[in-house]
Amino acid sequence: MGEMEKLRKEAESLKDQITAARKAVQDLTLQDHTSGTSVVGRVQLKIRKTLRGHLAKIYAMHWGGDTKLCVSASQDGKLIVWDTCTTNKVHAIPLKSSWVMTCAYAPSGNMVACGGLDNMCSIYNLKGKDGSVKVMRELAGHNGYLSSCRFISDSEIITSSGDCTCCMWDIETGTQKTIFAGHLGDCMSLGMAPDFNTFISGACDFTAKLWDIRDGQCRQTFAGHESDINAIGFFPNGNAVITGSDDASLKLFDLRADQELMTFQDSSIMCGVTSLAPSISGRLLLAGYDDFNCNVWDTLKAERVGTLAGHDNRVSCMGVTGDGMACCTGSWDSFLKIWN
Amino acid sequence: MSNNSANNSLVLLHKSVKQLRLEAGIRRMKVSQAASDLKTFCLQNASKDPLLMGVPSNDNPFRPPKSCALF
């Protein structure tokens, strides 16, 4: 077993090297840089619309590119595409499996996808010739539940799964093009980089990983959370990653400095973060929690500057529109709310 | 420990070390530069951030306009 021992020692030494390299570039902290910046004023967003129609817990929502359309998924077995300005339901799509955990809107607006305990990602064509919405593909291959999915284009989609891997699929052929393996726990969430060259995943091994989409490599791993990472997203300029965890905190990791720059937590918050979305300047960080509320954080000062209280159950999902005009929250209370 | 599972652990350990070597080798920017860029981005884009600046009712797609223009 000499080789095992050698490899273990090398692994430990490399981990120490990484810790030292991160410390070596820590000349100043983000807090030092923003000590002269004042906290933003109290942010009071109001509910502008309530989207009613689902009959059970809402698990996921996703805005359609730069439009005011969004898709939501509920365990009532439906995907609903909403025109959020009018609150009209553009499509109500019945699902084969009601155990849905995620949904996504293609940037083109032509398709939506969803999946969950069926271990599959189902792609629906919204622009069918006869006007009806049909299943276009069922992407099967994961050995665990589908926790999240995001389109790269109309022909490629990335999925994250309870089988600890993420996968890039060719939608046309329904095959797995690249498998991203490395996490030691269920992958719970994924976020697409603004330039679509990389993506990030958050998992039950308490780490977040940055992946290169084309060569399938994990480029960086971020540790620090003390529990499952449920939510993840890119800072708007693509240079940082924000994570939300069951440990009741959010963290901001800078990709170029390869380390954590900020933690967003408060002793009065004791429940897990379920969802997050930055505003388009990145200055505000909106986060949904298990305690039915959302908190609005000043990203540069790590101070809470507002709350969104309006749901009667856990906030399970949220998203900010492409133009930053509004935020949508989805809840186990079966409603979606639009705020600005 | 059967030979098979011992080989399995060895393969996994090899992969782990290979991955760690890759991650150890990346170039890292100074935190001061990274932090400065983050702060600059936020401040430069603040005026175009509707959730931060507030949305006037007339321009709010989620609110009906309070008055109608009559010509």
Image (tube, rainbow, N blue to C red):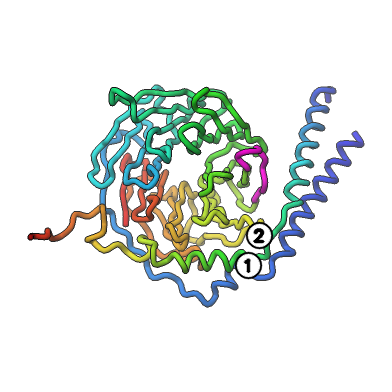
Residue A166 in view: yes
- At 35% across and 66% down in the image, what residue appears? B53
The quadrant of the rendering that contains the C terminus of chain A is bottom left
Disc 2: which chain?
Answer: A
Q: Position of residue A70 (x, y in %)?
A: 35, 41
The quadrant of the rendering that contains the N terminus of chain A is top right
Q: Position of residue A141 (x, y in %)?
A: 57, 24
Can you say whether A163 is above or below A257 in the image? above
Can you say whether A55 is above or below B33 in the image? above
Q: Position of residue A326 (x, y in %)?
A: 34, 54
Mark 2: amino acid: Ala
Asked if residue B66 lies left or right of residue A299, the reply is left
* Element type where label 1 sits in the image: helix
- At 26% across and 40% down in the image, what residue appears? A52
- For the residues marked 2 and 1, what is the alpha-carbon distance in whole angstroms? 9 Å
Residue A184 in view: no
Q: For the view shown, which residue lies furthest in the bottom direction?
A: A36
Circles 2 and 1: CB atoms closer than 8 Å:
yes
Q: Position of residue A160 (x, y in %)?
A: 55, 36
* Element type where label 2 sits in the image: loop
**Which is nearer the eye, A286 or A315?**
A286
Read off the magenta span: A212-222
Q: Pointer 2: what residue?
A: A257
Residue A168 sits inside the magenta stretch: no
Q: Pointer 1: what residue?
A: B33
Disc 1: which chain?
Answer: B
Mark 1: amino acid: Gln
Q: Are marks 2 and 1 on the same chain?
A: no
**Which is nearer the eye, A281 or A308?**
A281
Residue A214 sits inside the magenta stretch: yes
